[in-house]
Image (cartoon, grey):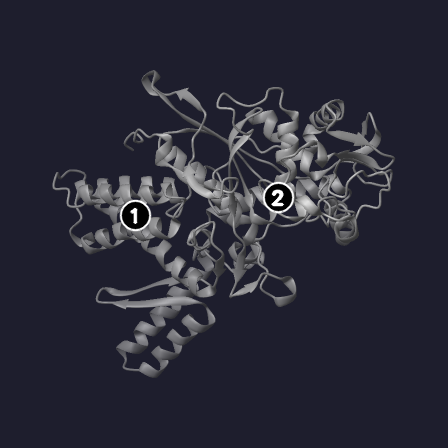
Amino acid sequence: MPDAPEAHASDFRLYNTRTRQVEPLAPAEQTAAGEGKPVPHLRFYACGPTVYTFAHIGNFRSFLTADLIQRTARALGWQVTYVSNVTDVGHLSEDDLTDPAGEDKMAQALEEEGRRFANVYDLARFYTEALVEDWRRLNLREPTVRPRATEHMAGQIKAVEKLVERGHAYETEQGVYFSVESFPGYGALSGNEEAQSLQASGRDTVTDPEKRDPRDFALWKKDPDHLMQWHSPWGWGFPGWHIECSVMGRAYLGETFDLHTGGEDLIFPHHECEVAQNESLRDNTGDESGGPSIRHWAHTRFLQVEGEKMSKSKGNFFTVRDLALPRDEGGEGIDPLALRLTLISGQYRKPFNFTRKTLRDSAQTVRRYREVRERAEKALEEDAGGDDDRAGTQLDAIYDRTLAAMCDDLNTPAALAAAYEGIKLLRGIEEEMNGATARSAMDWLEKTNALLGIVGYDTGETDRAAKKEPGAVDDAFAQQVEALLAERADARERGDYERADAIRDRLEDEMDVEVMDNPDGTDWRRKLSV
């Protein structure tokens, strides 16, 4: 693959939730690359899931935004340090409020799952492993670090101690709270009026008479009945959800870093609370430019399914596994890369409507990418030489347009449309493809896949389900299909077209096999279920 182009911060622009405008994603740090030339070093944190159940496709839309940011930065030749956490303690069931009184989601899940898990730690391990499997199934690149909240307890306790020492937090009989009054900038990220005028009567669900302000949120909760507890200067308890991300981000990225991402539901209160904590924990008054501790915030909008909010009660709630696991493992057997393509087909900061039609179209698009790749591979086998490259210059221009669209606030609709021009170009000349054109095609496919992740897997070893090609069949099934096709061919040769049609109907309707007659005979493949 050719070297990545030289790039400057102004080449990559993202909407910044903090400033309410699209602006350059400007890494503060430069790292020496090849020949000692400095390149931007993007350091960013993406909020990961609470591992009490399988992640759903709405979660993965947000995770894919972070994945595309990482891929685009690397395509520009940047260095990337990317942290995406796992929350395995402290996230309560009413954490959409500033300081909830709901049950811990991990403990709640353990109670609902009964005896399936021996303890809450086993539950966390199981769903973390499932997350990683689905992550790879959808061809997301691994983050540089995937920290777990329970592995950073000492850091969280020390951070709370520092906030208390600096007058930003105080202790009560029930816990330790961050004093919002001590941080005048609270509410600036979200613009949430409630952040300024929250009243105890409406939103203060924690019945702690010692709380000084209804807006104050918990840094440490004292609860002798909680399933996961650690000893602290304030007694046995567990951390609040918000302090976890602040501590993990600072542990791997430092006091200041370039970017923080997550779903739009995290802007308030979670990210608003992170801002207050991060700024109050800083040992200096600002970075070299005097800016905030986190310079850029990017948030992914909600996903709907068939025009409605995703809901289990409506029957339109899907996990990645529901759709992408093979049928014999309880899923629908949908091509995972088609699911990935569907989830990135709408721009991240616009609401997206997930539909079966879009999924069918995506499956067809992914199949065409594979067919072009297979044709290029065949051309290389047949003609390793040849210098008449009929597509290289045009493919380079198409890739440049694709990358430019991604640099334009992750404009995935424009990027995908540009990339598909390459497929149309190569399909138009596939019968005359020689070695030189095939090499250009393979290079373009590799670069496009590195940027968008929809041509083939590039995450290294994946689990068996992720690696399994959609439509793949075992030997026994293939033998059954071939026997029926032979019987159909015999019936057609004898003029028994009624029998031939009946066999085709059985193959297509009962066995989900697509039968394709052509001048050289009959081909077949498993249908993609969408």
Q: Give the class, few, some or many, for how many residues have Cα within 10 Å of label 1's Cα (few <14, many ≥20).
A: many
**Rendered image quadrant of residue 217:** top right
Q: Nearer the viewer, residue 281 or 499?
A: 281
Question: How many numbered marks appear?
Answer: 2
Q: Is residue 144 above or below residue 395?
A: above
- Mark 2: amino acid: Pro
Name the image quarter holding the N terminus: top left
Image: 371 above or below 229: below
The extreme top residue here reads: 36
Label 1 secondary element: helix
Residue 179 percent location from the top left of the image: 74, 34
Answer yes or no: do the residues labelled 1 and 2 have beta carbons within 8 Å? no
Q: Which residue is mark 1?
A: 373
Estimate the x, y position of residue 261 in percent, counting from the top left: 53, 40
Q: Is residue 37 left or right of residue 263?
A: left
Q: Position of residue 493 (x, y in %)?
A: 26, 76
Question: In the image, is 333 to the left or to the right of 36?
Answer: right
Which amino acid, mark 1? Arg
Q: Earlier in the sequence, mark 1 or mark 2?
A: 2
Dot 2 falls on a residue whose secondary structure is loop
Instruction: Let me know if residue 383 appears in the view.
Output: no
Disc ID at residue 49:
2
Say above or below: 181 vs 290: below
Residue depicted at 47% across the width and 64% down the height: 356
Q: Residue at x 72, y 25 (%)?
A: 154
- Label 2: few (<14), some (14–19) or many (≥20) C-alpha neighbours in 10 Å: many
Pinpoint residue 203: horizontal percent, then vertical percent.
Answer: 75, 50
Note whether residue 289 is visible: yes
